[in-house]
Image (cartoon, rainbow, N blue to C red):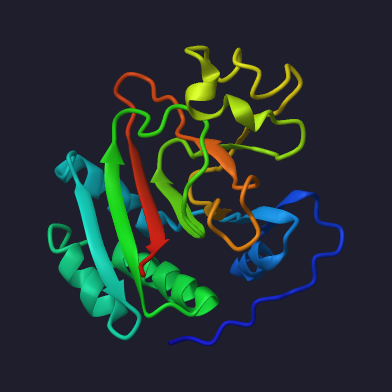
Amino acid sequence: MTVYAFEHDTDNLPTTVATALSPVVFSHIYKPEHNIAIWQRSLAEQLQKEVAESIATNPDLSINAVINEDSIRTDIDKALEKLPSAQELKADLAKLVDMFCYLFELKRTGLRLRVLERAMCPRFHVDRVPCRLVSTYYGSGSQWLQNAGLDRTKLGAGHQGLSDEESGLMTANTKIHSLNEGDVALLKGETWQDNEGKGLVHRSPVLAAGEKRLLVTLDFIA
């Protein structure tokens, strides 16, 4: 496993979110004031090409796999056997898994890689997980809200049939933030220690007719 020098200096970072052009930002997820850490990045041209080809040849792609920390590349190669030529994609996924396992001292993680044609989770919600890695290789990125000013009683059934914008969850001035294509984010959930009631509020983006996304997520496995 690669040894990562994650930084721990959080000076001048805004409430809730930590962002940087390097994955060292991921260590900020351990700070109680941060419930999302974003590695802002652009995908290499070859990786973009492989992603586009993978979507074109596998429009219904849906992969769920357990990736072990001591056999990351082997497990990913097996999970992505439908994508034999997507070597850059496999290498990138291996890097994400390696960092995720290292940061949280995990022996294995759950990987999902899916082509989506509609919003998987169209309403704002929180996840009942400690932390989840999310990245969109192609298409619109996930949307999220800062903690301040939210009425969390309007999540779930509390919206009473009204849209997120109308339910009272947020005010008219609340900014809806979006991840960019290629960004890698750690989303702190409700079951992170001492984080109940503060899990990141987020949702899937609405997709236009014919629009697709290629989404990857990594999760803890007990």
Left or right: residue 182 compared with residue 67: right
Q: Return the x and y of residue 88 as percentages of the image width and height.
A: 33, 65
Residue at image position (59%, 67%) is 23
Residue at image position (81%, 56%) is 13
Instruction: Please say if 208 is above or below 193.
Output: above
Q: Return the x and y of residue 3 as percentages of the image width and height.
A: 53, 87
Instruction: Please say if 51 is above or below 213.
Output: below
Say which quadrant the C terminus sits in: bottom left
Residue at image position (46%, 30%) is 205
Which residue is more in the foreground, 20 or 11? 11
Instruction: Please say if 145 is above or below 16.
Output: above
As drawn, which residue projects farthest toward the left?
Answer: 82
Left or right: residue 132 compared with residue 115: right
Instruction: Please say if 6 is above or below 53.
Output: below
Left or right: residue 73 compared with residue 9: left
Q: Return the x and y of residue 87 as percentages of the image width and height.
A: 27, 67
